[in-house]
Image (cartoon, helix red, strand yellow):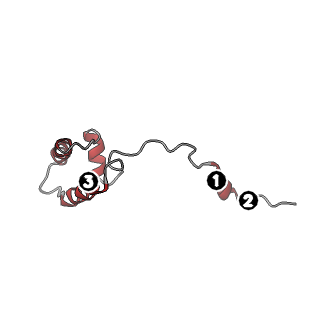
Amino acid sequence: MARKPALLDEVLTLSQNRRPGFGTWYSRLPDDARDELDAVRSAFDPQRHQKRAYARAIIEACKSRGWQTSGVQGVLAWLDGRR
């Protein structure tokens, strides 16, 4: 008699995404843009910068370079490290 797989293995196999879905605004950028944005995120200091103003500045600077971002909420989440 064949042994059934462990419940966890079965659930993990069945729960895999069937379709890739949408990438984040950050993941759709070219590598060099992500490198620059990583430096921008590292330079963010909540003691010196207002987070919302910093996010808006990121959006404007990216727009001037032709890079698409999300709205302010998405950039705020990215600044917080949630991608």
Query: How many marks are shown on the rendered structure?
Result: 3
Which quadrant holds residue 6? bottom right
Q: Amino acid at mark 1?
A: Thr
Residue drawn at (43%, 42%), measured in percent from left and top? 22
Disc 2 packing (10 Å; few <14; some 14–19; many ≥20): few
Please give the residue where the numbered disc 1 appears in the rendered image: 13
Q: Secondary structure at mark 1?
A: helix
Q: Earlier in the sequence, mark 1 or mark 2?
A: 2
Provide residue 5's location: percent of width, then percent of height: 73, 59
Neighbour class for label 1 at 10 Å: few (<14), some, many (≥20)? few
Looking at this view, is 45 or 40 the one in front? 40
Give, as a three-letter code, the residue at label 3.
Answer: Ala
1 and 2 marks in contact (CB < 8 Å): yes
Q: Position of residue 3 (x, y in %)?
A: 81, 61
Q: How much space separates mark 3 and mark 1, taking CA atoms?
A: 35 Å
Distance, label 1 to label 2, CA atoms, is 10 Å
Secondary structure of residue under mark 3: helix
Residue marked by disc 2: 5
The residue under the point 27% across, 45% down is 75
Instruction: Report whether 15 appears left or right of 44.
Output: right
Of the 4 image quadrants, the one containing the N terminus is: bottom right
The answer to whether 72 is drawn above or below residue 34 in the figure is above
Q: Is residue 52 left or right of residue 15?
A: left
- Say what amino acid the circle numbered 2 marks: Pro
Q: Which mark is residue 33?
A: 3
Q: Position of residue 33 (x, y in %)?
A: 26, 53
State which quadrant residue 59 falls in: top left
